[in-house]
Each structure stands twice: as C-alpha cells, then as structure tokens.
Amino acid sequence: MTRKAGGRGQVTLPKHLREDFGISGGDEVTIREEGNKIVIEKPTSREELAEGYRRRADRDRELTAEMEDISQEADSTLGDAPAWEH
C-alpha cells in the first residue's frame, strides 16, 4: 500500500493498521531507520514491559524447579559426585 507524504512530510496511517496495533490519535510512535527502510512501531508500554519481565521470572522459576528435581533424581540414582583430586 502506498501513501503520499504531505508538504510537511506527514503520512496518515491506514485505519485498519491503527486499529490492529492499537494506535489512536495523539499516541506516540517510534520511527527508526532499518537498513534502507523507515520503520514505524508502537512503543512498548510500561505495563507491557512489566508483564514481559513477570513472564520471564515465571519461566526462570519453573526452570529452576525443574533443574532441582533433575538434580535430586540424579543424586538418588548416581549418588554423590566423587571429590576432585588436585
């Protein structure tokens, strides 16, 4: 799809894209260069960022619990590891 830039370089985002990406009049967007392209994207909100950190922390806790279970299983099957000799 193509759009004409106005005299001041303004371009209107198509309605369906504004709706799909949750962009309303007055919202900020991030504009950056990517190679030979201009990329316009909705910035990540503080709430979205916080949710991402919460999901990451949850995954880390799940992985830690899984690794503890595996470690206990290995200890019960294999016994303690021998001491290292220098």
Image (spheres, helix red, strand yellow):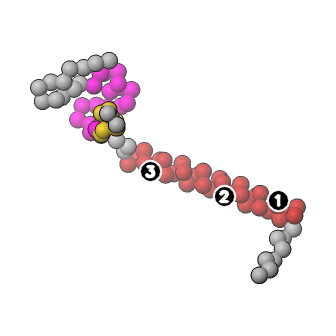
Viewer-closest of 84 and 57: 84
Q: Of the residues tagged 2 and 3, which is closer to the observer?
A: 2
Mark closer to the chain start, 2 or 1:
2
Mark closer to the chain start, 1 or 3:
3
Badge 1 amino acid = Glu
Mark closer to the chain start, 2 or 3:
3
Q: Secondary structure at mark 1?
A: helix
Q: Would you name the residue on which mark 1 appears?
A: 73
Q: Is residue 5 magenta?
A: no
Q: Of the residues tagged 1 and 3, which is closer to the observer?
A: 1
Q: Residue at x 30, y 21 (%)?
A: 15
Badge 3 amino acid = Ala
Image quadrant occupied by the C terminus: bottom right
* Left or right, residue 66 beside residue 85: left
Q: Residue at x 16, y 29 (%)?
A: 9
* Left or right, residue 6 beside residue 20: left
Q: Which mark is residue 64?
A: 2
The picture places residue 8, in percent across and down from the top left corner, at 12, 30
**Magenta highlight range:** 13-31
Image quadrant occupied by the N terminus: top left
Q: Is residue 16 magenta?
A: yes
Identify whether 51 is placed above or below 11. below
Q: Residues within 10 Å of mark 3 (few under 14, many from 20)?
A: few
Residue 25: name its quadrant.
Answer: top left
The picture places residue 60, in percent across and down from the top left corner, at 60, 55
Res. 40 visible in picture: no
Q: Residue furthest bottom?
A: 86
Q: Secondary structure at mark 2?
A: helix
Residue 42: name its quadrant.
Answer: top left
Q: Would you name the residue on which mark 3 appears?
A: 50
Res. 46 visible in picture: yes
Q: Residue at x 32, y 32 (%)?
A: 37
